[in-house]
Amino acid sequence: HAECVLVFIHNKRFENIFTKTTHKYEDIIGTQVHSNLCNDKCLELFVLHGPAEKIKGLFSEIRRNKRVDYVKLVTP
């Protein structure tokens, strides 16, 4: 079991791609914050609780996506 924060930034045009990915992991998402930034960028922040392997799976899918501008997994 793990608890951590996932932060990533993407272009607003690709919102649907990231929404589809995160919906597959709803069971480990405790909190989600979406913020519109300048230059058509979006900041996504997720507080995650659950099996470490499932958290790793979400992080890996986001990181592999070529449309992500920044991704960081913060663990205690």
Image (tube, rainbow, N blue to C red):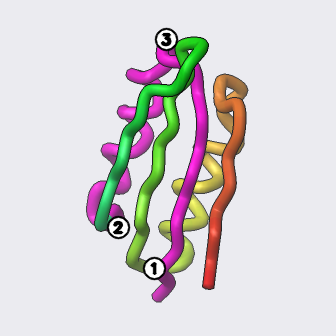
Q: Position of residue 60 (x, y in %)?
A: 65, 52
Q: Which residue is mark 1?
A: 51
Residue contact at pointers 2 and 1, CB within 8 angstroms: yes
Q: Secondary structure at mark 2?
A: helix
Q: Nearer the viewer, residue 44 or 16?
A: 44
Residue 55 within the magenta-colored segment of the rendering: no
The residue under the point 52% across, 26% down is 37
The residue under the point 54% across, 58% down is 6
Cα–Cα gap, marks 3 and 1: 31 Å
Residue 9 within the magenta-colored segment of the rendering: yes
Q: Nearer the viewer, mark 3 or mark 1?
A: 3
Name the amino acid type tagged 3.
Arg
Q: Position of residue 28 (x, y in %)?
A: 35, 67
Q: Nearer the viewer, mark 3 or mark 2?
A: 3
Q: Earlier in the sequence, mark 3 or mark 2?
A: 3
Name the amino acid type tagged 2.
Ile
The residue under the point 29% across, 56% down is 26
Q: Secondary structure at mark 3?
A: helix
Q: Which residue is mark 2?
A: 28
Q: Earlier in the sequence, mark 3 or mark 1?
A: 3
Name the amino acid type tagged 1.
Pro
Residue 13's disc number: 3
Q: How many marks?
A: 3
- Specify the segment rendered in magenta: 1-29
Could you tell whether 74 is left or right of 45 in the image?
right
Could you tell whether 45 is left or right of 67 in the image?
left
Task: State the image quarter where residue 56 is shown.
Answer: bottom right
Q: Secondary structure at mark 1?
A: loop
Q: Position of residue 67 (x, y in %)?
A: 66, 24
Q: Quadrant of the C terminus?
A: bottom right
The residue under the point 34% across, 52% down is 32
Q: Residues within 10 Å of mark 1 (few under 14, many from 20)?
A: few
